[in-house]
Image (cartoon, rainbow, N blue to C red):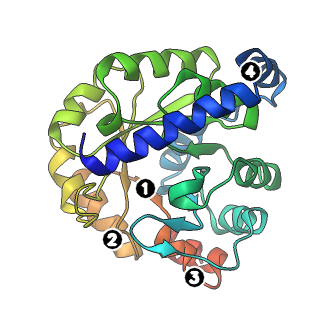
Amino acid sequence: MNDILKNISKTKLEYVEKCKIKRPLAEVEGMALKAPPVRGFINSLHLAKKAGNFGLITEIKKASPSKGLIRKDFNPKELAKAYELGGASCLSVLTDTPYFMGKDKHLVDARAATALPVLRKDFILDPYQIIESRALGADCILIIMAMVDDTLAAELETVALEYNLDVLVEVHDANELKRSQKLESQLVGINNRNLKTFDVSIETTIDLASLADPSLTLVSESGFFLNSDLKMINEKANINTFLIGESLMRQNNVKLATQKLLCNS
């Protein structure tokens, strides 16, 4: 784990410990059991593919560590509605505050505004966060293989599955991809962003897709701006599912931009 991820991990674990004091596990478990039924995240992506469309996971993200503030007029409810009307299959909502200016409320508001399944995009490092995610209404959680060892990854996935959550397992290189295939989840995200330099190259997806088990549902993440980008990855890597955030978040008309990306307009 590089220094950047070590710092993020330290900050996140300290924050989680404070959350446990403020809202004990038993209370969060009770909230999770009362949460609305999960919406099938993976199923929504599969339905898009079955219909001959790209499966698009659109991100609600106010800021990022590499780019700073991305969108000033930030309204999760309106953004979620725009994405849904634009043809998105799922939502990804940032809830991390220190690095992305996210809030738990952003996820709650976005999910309430649409019928789309929602991924809680955060640095998940403790089983408490999994149960908390379900309590917030999340339908899917993220496990970043660069930030966890195999034992913790398996523990997090087990808890997620106990709460009927889908799991998106994120990888950045061949070693992480190999490790990810020890897990049950068939949804694997290939992040095209280098976590050391923050540079983005969609060639990462092409390289890693050739090494992946054909049974996996692969998601290519970051670096997409045009429908032609999606078609290129589809042709070269046989991937039809994408997670896109910044390029859409910077658009004035998010609905139209989503439609153009999918060529549904």
- The residues bearing labels 2 and 1 have C-alpha atoms spaced at a distance of 10 Å
Residue marked by disc 1: 242
At mark 2, the secondary structure is helix
Quadrant in which residue 253 is drawn: bottom right
Q: Locate the C terminus and report the quarter of the image it occupies.
A: bottom right
Distance between mark 4 and mark 1 Cα atoms: 36 Å
Q: Which residue is mark 4?
A: 24
Q: Amino acid at mark 2?
A: Asp
Per the image, the residue denoted by label 3 is 251
Residue at the image point whose x is 39% and y is 20% from the top: 152
Tell which tag, 4 or 1, sits nearer the viewer. Answer: 4
Which quadrant is home to the N terminus? Answer: top left
Residue 78 rendering spot, x and y as whole percentages: 77, 68
Q: Are marks 3 and 2 in contact (CB under 8 Å)?
A: no
Residue 190 seen in the current view: no
Task: Tell me the kind of residue under disc 4.
Answer: Pro
Q: Nearer the viewer, residue 195 or 192?
A: 195
Position above or below: 175 against 64: above
Residue named by callout 2: 229
The answer to which of marks 4 and 1 sits earlier in the sequence is: 4
Dot 4: what SS? Answer: loop
Q: Nearer the viewer, residue 45 or 70?
A: 70
- Mark 3 or 4, which is nearer the eye? 4
Q: CA distance from mark 3 to mark 2?
A: 17 Å
- Determine crowd level at label 2: few under 14, some 14-19, many 20+ residues with C-alpha closer than 10 A: few
The x, y position of residue 247, in whole percent, is 47, 74
| Mark 3 / mark 2, whichever is N-terminal | 2
Closer to viewer: mark 3 or mark 2:
3
Horizontal and vertical percent position of residue 88: 60, 59
**Element carrying mark 3:** loop
- What's the distance in space between the residues labelled 2 and 4, CA to CA? 45 Å
Report helix, strand or loop for mark 1.
strand
